[in-house]
Image (cartoon, helix red, strand yellow):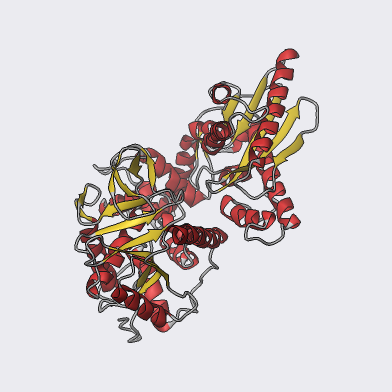
Amino acid sequence: MNPQSGVRVLLDASVVSRCRHRVHLDATAAGAGMSELARRPIPAGAVQRREAAALHRRTVREMMAAHHHEGWIAIDPDQAMRERANDTLAACAEGFQWIWGAVLPVDENGRRGGAELLVRDPGGTGYIPVIVVNHKVTDPGSGAMTSPVTRFDPRPDQRRRIRSQPRDQFRLAHLYRILESVGLAAPRAIGGVIGYDADCILAHDLGRETPAYGRSVLAEYDFRLADRRDIVAGRARTSPDRVGECKMCEWWPHCKTRLEESHDVSLVVNGAQADMLREAGLPTIDALASTSASAPAAWHGVPFGHVQAFARAWLHDVPLIRMVEWPQVRRADIEVDIDMESYQDHGAYLWGTLLTERDSEPQYRPFVTWDPLPTREEGRNFAEFWEWLTSIRRDAAQRGLTFAAYCYSKNAENRWLIESAQRFRGMNDMPSVAEVTRFINSEEWVDMLDAVQEQFLCPHGRGLKKVAPVAGFSWHDPDAGGEASMSWYRDAVGYEGGPPVPDQQQRLLRYNEDDVWATRVLREWMDSPRVLEVPTEEELDTRYRAELDDEARD
């Protein structure tokens, strides 16, 4: 119950893994309205993920329905929530083995929720919640408990290990507690997850102690839920804090204003480090910048001296700090900038290249397929890209010229270079995995992120869109970004069955071209005297100390 409005605030599973202050703001908005506070629209990336998840659930539903002709029922999703909950209870009472689209009644604690599937316990004494998610839930290894999708029979799996996904486990705990409240929970606290690959049901033992919490998932869930209920009821206070969740939160403009007004230390360090600094009596950026104290005893991660430099940079609006006298970057006679675009785990549809030879105008060339992924055309497109890249390298060697290819943050490119060669092995002109691996490990493959993080401190982040503007580059599209490009891609290829949208195809090509240009501009800047305009840590410290002396004299 919200004490300010008297309105009962219902709690869904996400509440236990959300930022505590966000829970407070959501509850206050639900109870009394907060239109006077700045919110932002739901980020495009969050919208895209919801749409992709909905499509994945529909695909899994069709697969599961085909497997389960007997004992299967689907709850009508077009009904009101109350009717769906009533139908779910009726299906349970009738003993259906598989109930798709289940909605559970709100319990006495204000919990609400639904499961993509309720599976009848093999003993027939209750139901097990199974959720469908659009991310990977296992990795190669061993130790997981999995079941075929054709039946629920979890057994040790020697091919899979659990990938940590706490939100999945907390959602299952939430659903299990609601099932308990209506007398429909299976005797054993267990839940299942069908992940992105949809090739098994991963079973989670919710009652078993886990090292991450020092207690079971259920016990951790109960502890967090009690805390969130206190927040909603006004019995526990919260305050803004910059955490990873902020980038997708609608309340960030409101919280950002408050954090900037107070110079909160979380603006320059991560959440755990911010807590340590507050406990050490350094709650503000100013206190961190001026302290002569050593790092807190439990400090880890970024060196303490560097975070002090971050604080001084924030106070002076300095986006980059130089750690070396003169930064170095590998250059070559023939240079190719490469940027890959992929769609989730389906594959890589675009390999963008920018070819630069001395005394010649750079040439952008995209290798792209607009056939919706997954498609064999992806393999043909990759082979064409690889043959072109190989021909440029071969030509450089024959002419006695040096060659280098550049990317920014090579993990994504490396993944799809290798996976493309693996998945499309045997296609015409497809390189071997060994050939691709040799290139990745060669001096010709240069990650500009390595050059940046080895020679600069980046107070605002090391992403290309944070660093390249310091070199004078800007993107044509203000909404350009990896998250937004996912939505653009869905429209570009008609992913939902509609016609492809050529304008979105062009938008993706322009975004990709900007990315390879940004990498080139950054490299040219690092190789020019202009890079010396970036202050060193010592120069920044001298400037800061001089200002402190001036303030003391005043």
Q: Residue furthest right?
A: 360
Q: Which residue shows up at 65% across the image and 35% down it?
A: 382
Residue 16 place in picture, x, y as percent: 32, 64
Q: Is residue 318 left or right of residue 142?
A: right
Q: Which residue shows up at 36% across the image and 62% down it?
A: 19
Please identify the quarter of the rendering in which residue 406 is found.
top right
Q: Which residue shows up at 68% across the image and 62% down it?
A: 498
Residue 367 place in picture, x, y as percent: 71, 38
Q: Quadrant of the N terminus?
A: bottom left
Instruction: State the count of labels.
Output: 0
Q: Is residue 204 left or right of residue 372?
A: left
Q: Pick the residue in front: 283 or 18.
A: 18
Task: Report whether residue 204 is seen.
Answer: yes
Residue 11 place in picture, x, y as percent: 34, 73
Q: Is residue 304 left or right of residue 539?
A: left
Residue 76 place in picture, x, y as percent: 46, 75
Q: Pick the residue in front: 412 or 547.
A: 412
Q: Quadrant of the C terminus?
A: bottom left
Q: Which residue shows up at 71% across the image and 18% down it?
A: 394
Please identify the quarter of the rendering in which residue 227 is found.
bottom left
Instruction: Look at the picture and state if 382 lies above or below 545.
Output: above
Instruction: Look at the picture and state if 202 lies above or below 516.
Output: below
Q: Pick the residue in front: 250 or 54.
A: 54
